[in-house]
Structures are given as structure tokens and as C-alpha cells.
Image (tube, rainbow, N blue to C red):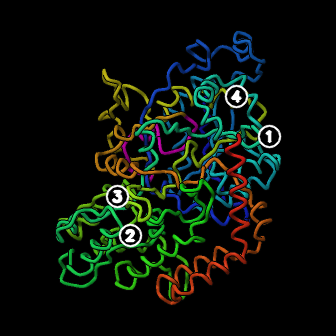
Amino acid sequence: MKFSKMKKAIALASVLTMVLPLAACGGNDAGNSSQESSSQSQSESQDPNNGSTDGSESSSQQSEAEGKPEASYPDDVTLTYYLRGGTSEYEPYLYDDLVGMQKIQEASGINLDYEVICGDNDAIKTQYLAMIQSGKYPDIIQWLHKESYNGGVDQLYNDGVIIELNDLIENHMPNLKKILDEHPNLAKDMMNDKGQYLYFTKLNPLESQDDLVGICNFGFLMRKDWLENVGLNAPTTIDEWYEVLKAFKTQDPNGNGIDDEIPFDAGAAGLNLFYPAFDILNGIYVDPATGKVGYGAYSENYREFLTTMNKWYSEGLIGNIWAEEGSYAIADGGSTDEHIYGDIAGSWKGLANNWEQRLPGILEKNPNADLVACIWPYSTMSSGVQYTPNTYYSTIDRTTTCISVDCKYPEAAAKLIDYMYSEEGGMYLTWGVEGETYTTDANGKHEWTDYGNEVIEYYDGNFPRKFTYAMAHVSFPRFGQNDVSNTYGDEYANACDIWSKCDVSLIYPGAIAITQDELDAAIGAESDMGDYISEMQMKFITGEEPLTNFDTYLEELKKKGVEDYIKVYQDAYDRYNAR
């Protein structure tokens, strides 16, 4: 079998603009972490070759044997596979060289020609939108469709870009069909309100602690050595947070004799992590007390959140998190990194990989530095509850994979992707090749081999060889594979475990898609509601606007249509629950 080695780093095509939903989720933490995962076996997975070991059985013979509608495509069919890359030199080449994906192609009998879209987030989004606008589509498109395209996959279908998948799943995808039959919650989340399947994705059953740990790669991080220096433990409540931050501010925990500490560096939207302690989220959430949809910044609980943050700010416990004087835009993570590496940030919103990617830099400044992950603070309003702000708690991944209307052989695409959903395919995507990059002991536990962990040069990169076999953090369609404790170091796994122990009741289901047209109809396409909320948050926290004007703020939000905005989400939530 031949595999195309054409390397495609698609150039910037044109500049497009689009209006995104007002309440879109915050930054993508996955961009700075390898959210790699391990194997959770799917029992009785089915080989797409139905017993053929070399993939040579013709598609028509296989269909007749299974009693399914005949699929017809050439034995040497090649499909184009379109997906996101990054900014590194090696990005256009790595997918062709992934040994695990090569094994999947061999097993399914389907060749792939990758189109890897490279550049920063804005550049690759522009290229993606230019591709959609061109009217000429790759066979398979793997992307953050919900976040990048107005209306997500439903709108892509309505606009004639992608096809419905129900028939393919029913007749040509035995592995995926079995998963959906055995996990009706996954079927409910994957289908839309009309009962259509329009995409494939990484499916997480959320049935075990490993399933939860696999999607919990960010949370509160704190300097463990600073805690030791002030004689306190990691905080668990808002009151304990205040005590710790106050000590960080007044007791010189970095030991340099200068009053330069920033107790909580809230850049990169770090303050958002405190919303759940007040039983709300930043944006749309589900009120656990009523089961109704609400909006965090339009609630009495938000007043309490602002009161606390105003107190912390006035006492110097959180830094100036705004990008520039007079701006209400939140500073990005760059400023936080500067403070972290400068040994002046005591706590921050961090990733589980900070022990590998941040701690070495801090140690250059302070050889005694160490980190600790903090639990989500207990609610100030619901006794004993730890709500999470992690809206990525979902059975479906943010990245979705669709088959375009230009795909001449959709059955071939279905066969390839169905193999990814098999146990064997999931292992190829997560661990690579047994005996080469990993081994399995008598208890079924997988371990990386020395060969897999050996650091190699690859174009402009230096990383373990295993990443030329499998990249589990890339969201290829698959099922489970969430044993983080086996795939990462102890600090990473322990942090994820801490952040996974929480109540997810506040989270609005990620499977629900809201179109921009629906939101525009509710509040108007030119609404400045989001800007107004950001501006007033800055003013309330800094004291520029007194909190005695909070009721006036709520009235202004009501005039701007916030209740109509909430209703759009409530109606969609009701439809989802009726599926």
C-alpha cells in the first residue's frame, strides 16, 4: 500500500471576519499542554476488515458478508484529511510520519493525504474560513467547528458543506454503532435536535475517575515553597484563600527583601476560576437549585463575587490584570509568565504541565521553588460543594470531524474513522505500537518503553520518539483512552486528579449548539452587552464604579436583552433534555 508523502502547509488565503457567540468559552488550555491519555479498553471492538488481517478484502465482498448495503470504492482510495497544525517547522510533516496513523491506514485499507493548516490561531482560523468560503472541500475536515464557524456543524450542514452520517454509522461503522448503542448518553450528545449525526469526535463516557481526570488539565496552582515559608496549607475555601494571599503579600515569601509579590496573578482570565465558589460561572450556567439556565454576570451571586474581588484588589492581593491603562481587556498569559518566571507570582491559573514547562524556569530564579495544585474552593453558598469552572466536562470533544459533500467515497471515510473507534485504533492513536513505544503488563497496565521516551531531533523540534508514533492530545475520533495516570508524570496526574474531584452541576452541556442567528435575533447583531459586562467588571473590581450601583448595572443589562439571551439557551437546553 502506498501512502502519500505530500506535505501541505497551506498559505494564508484571505482575511475574513465573523461574529462569534457572545458567551463563547474562554481560552483553549490545550494549546499549551499535551493532554495525552492512555487506554481504556472497549470490549469486543470490531475490526473493519471483518476478519481480514491484511485489509485486502474488497469493500463489496465485506458488505455482502455483513448483510449491509454495498460500499463501492477503489482498493487504493486516497482521502484528503484536513486538520489544525501549529507554528513549529515540523507541523506539516508530523502527521504523515505518525506510525500509529500509518497502522490505521494499513488496517482499514484507506490512504490519507494530510492538509495541515499551520500558523497562529488567527492565521489558521482565517485559512479554515477561506477554505469553507471557496466551495471546494477536503474529504475529511477535523477542526474546532463550533468555535470557528458561525453556527457550528449544524450550520455547516445547512450551508451544504458536510453530509449527514446516520446511514454510514448504521451500515458501515460497527465499532461506533456498538459504542452508541451501549452508551445512550453519548448518542444523545452526538446527535442534534433533529436526530442527525453530523460529526465524529473523541468520546468520553465520563463513567470513571480516569474519564474525569482525562479532561482536567488546568486549575489553581500555588507556590508550595511560599506556603511553607508563611506556615500555611493550600487553601480550600474563599476565606482560606484570603488568609494565604494576605500572608503572601505581607510576609515576603520569596525572601528577596522587596515588597514585589503578586499573591494571585489573575492574567489570562484567572479570576474566572473563582466564580463557582459563588455558585455561578462566567457566562451561561445551569443553576443547580432550580435546574434553570442563568448568566453569571446577571445574578445576585455575582454581586458577592465582585465584592470579594474588590476587597482583594484594594489590598493588593491580585495584580492589575488589565492589558493597559483605561482598558477593560484582560491581559493574556504573557504577563503572567513574566511574573511566574520572575519569582513574584504566588498563585495563578495554570496547567498540569507547569511542573515540566514552568517550574524549571522558576528554579533558575529560586532554587527552592516548588508547586502545588489547589482544590476548587468550597462554595460560599452551598455547604460542602466544590463546583468546577471547567466547561470542558463533556462526553464530546471540542474538536469534531466531518465528511464533506465533496468526498466521493464517504464509505471509505467511514471505514477509516470506524477503525479509530476500535480498541486497536484507539491504542494506535494513544500509545503507538506495542513492543516499540509501550508494553503491557499482566494486569493490563501500559508503560512507555525507553525507546519511546528517547528524545530525538525532528526538524526544529526535540521531543520523545513516542510523539512520532502517537499524539494522544490531538483529538482524532476515538473512544475512551483516558488513563492519564499511566501516560504522565506523577505531578501532572496528581494535579489532574485534584481538579477532577468536583461537582459539575453548573456546567451547561457542551453538546448543545447555539447559532449566532439565534443570539442576534434575541439581542441584536450589534449588541455591546459583552463589552459592557467586561467594562463594568473592571470598574467594580478596581473601585472605579461603586458596588452601590450594582442594581443600576443589572437594569442596564436587562435593557440590553440579557433575559432574551438567556432564553435562547434555556430553549435549547429544554430541546436537548427532550432528545
Query: Which corner quadrant of the image does residue 75 belong to?
Result: top right
Number of numbered labels in the structure image: 4
Q: Point out the tag, 3 or 2, that comes first from the N-terminus.
A: 2
Question: What is the C-alpha distance between the residues marked 4 and 3?
Answer: 40 Å
Q: Which mark is residue 405?
A: 1
Instruction: Please state if 90 lies on the left or on the right of 557 as rendered.
Output: left
Q: Which mark is residue 354?
A: 3
Q: Nearer the viewer, residue 485 or 140?
A: 485
Nearer the viewer's eye, disc 4 or disc 1? 4
Residue indicated by mark 4: 169
Question: What is the C-alpha distance between the residues marked 4 and 1?
Answer: 16 Å
Q: Amino acid at mark 4?
A: Ile
Instruction: Answer whether labels 3 and 2 touch (C-beta < 8 Å).
Output: no
- The location of residue 428, given as percent across then percent down, is 48, 31
Question: What is the C-alpha distance between the residues marked 4 and 2?
Answer: 46 Å
Around disc 2, counting alpha carbons within 10 Å, would you say few (fewer than 14), some (14 to 19), or many (20 or more)?
Answer: some
Nearer the viewer's eye, disc 3 or disc 1? 3
Q: Nearer the viewer, residue 173 or 116?
A: 173
Picture layout, residue 432 above or below residue 321: above
Question: What is the C-alpha distance between the residues marked 3 and 1?
Answer: 42 Å
- Please state the extent of the stretch shown in magenta in the rendering: 460-478
- At 43% from the left and 53% from the top, the residue drawn is 33
Q: Quadrant of the C terminus?
A: top right
Nearer the viewer's eye, disc 4 or disc 3? 4
Residue indicated by mark 2: 337
